[in-house]
Image (tube, grey):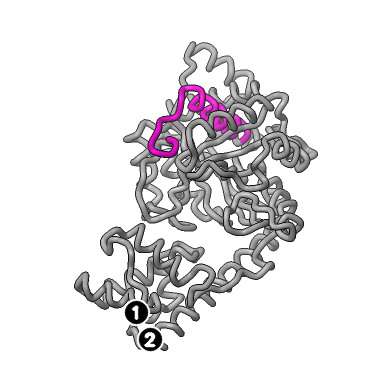
Amino acid sequence: MNILQNYPNPDELIAWFDGLNKDSVYEVNGHVHTPFSFSAFSEISEIFEMAKKENIKVVGINDFFVSDGYPYFYEQSIKHSVFALFNIEFIGLLKEEQAAGIRINDPNNPGRCYFSGKGLSFPFTLPKDLDAKLYSVVQESQVQVQKMVDKANAWFTELNAGIFLDFKSLKKKFAKELVRERHIAKAIRVAVFEKEATEAGRKELFKLIYGGKDSKVDINDIPALENEIRGNLLKSGGKAFVEEDDKAFMNIDEVIKIIVGAGGIPCYPVLLDDKNGTYTEYEADNEKLYAELTKRNIGCIELIPGRNGASHLEKFVKFFDSKGFVVNFGTEHNAPDMIPLTCDTRGKVALSPEMQRISFEGACVIAAHQYLRAKGLPAFIDVSGKPETARKDYFVKLGKAVIEKFINQ
């Protein structure tokens, strides 16, 4: 049961909100991964406990491929009176760009494209044909991960390292359902720590499994160590690297079809500038990116501000906001290190008041979309799959009312 189904109709809800004479701008984090894909959090409840401490009123689940965490996320949302956005993330492929060597939003793999869906229906549903397609892609991803585990074990056996990874045990111990590369790195780190009790012994064992290379990170810095394991063993050139099969990727049009079929809003995740101020070829020109996105009926973008410079973020966001795009910010938390949920830019520079407003308004549009879908009413994505960007202001206002009612229930 979705509580939004019981809310008053839109006109009544807006009238109630107007009567409050209140127009707060709330802190939002619209992109957080949970243990159902891979997360810095071991339990979903921790996300909401942190949100309450940081006075964040809206949080969005954004796991890779799966909606398995939605019921638990909803339960914690109700318990803590923090509004939940039901999102999802895919990895797709643009084959023409891949052939041309054009990087999209993956800085290392031309043609590879991360892509999100925002405000999916809760409870999650998909037409049978789309559900079957999604299931097959998830299964292909797990085949690849299983092969990586097998190759890692073969390498450990060759070295006589005394380590063995059992896929079923790894899945049960470290993953909720979906096993990803980061789970393997974590399992290897834990296996090394269990085998060797001393720091010196652990360093020697890592040197062995790295093919004679010394570890370059603090052995007690768990996030850095697990990233080093990935880089040495699981990435291209590593002994356990397995190239992903094209069957593990959908093209972007297929991804969009699944998102819309699940009641969501197609959303392009923007990589933007790196620490040197450079962009991918796909994102280098705002006007060209805008044309590419609108051509695919995409009227929503999201950014992870912590990896961007404040000036780059401001310029980019203002451009797309002026075009009527919905803009979302998040932190991902898709790595072992635990960072705050509050969004800031590179170097921990706080978001400007304007960026906070735009972020909150983006969350309001998604909240309004979820509410309207729950009520069985036309929402932000029209029947043809196009975003109602011309009516963005209406969705912002309605979303403010939805969020305000939820957090004060």
Quarter of the image for residue 91 reads bottom right
SS assignment at label 1 = helix
Whichever of callouts 1 and 2 sits on the residue coming sooner in the sequence is 2
Q: Amino acid at mark 1?
A: Leu
Q: Residue at x 67, y 43 (%)?
A: 266
Query: Residue reaching furthest right?
Result: 384
Quadrant containing the N terminus in the rendered view = top right
Q: Secondary structure at mark 2?
A: helix
Residue range of the region highlighted in magenta in the rendering:
344-369
User: Can you identify the residue that label 1 sits on?
Assistant: 208
Query: Is mark 1 in CB contact (under 8 Å) with mark 2?
Result: yes
Residue 91 higher or lower than 214, as above or below? above
Frontmost residue, 326 versus 404: 326
Confirm whether the magenta stretch covers residue 81: no
Q: Residue 90 at x, y = what percent?
A: 61, 54
- The residue located at (60%, 24%) in the rendering is 396
**What secondary structure is the stretch in magenta mostly built from?**
helix
198 and 254: which is toward the camera: 198
| Horizontal arrangement in the rendering, residue 395 relative to residue 43 (left or right) | right
> In the rendered image, is residue 1 in sight?
no
Relative side of 142 to 320, left or right:
left
Which residue is under mark 2? Answer: 159
> How far across and how far down the image is residue 402, in percent?
54, 27
Q: Amino acid at mark 2?
A: Leu
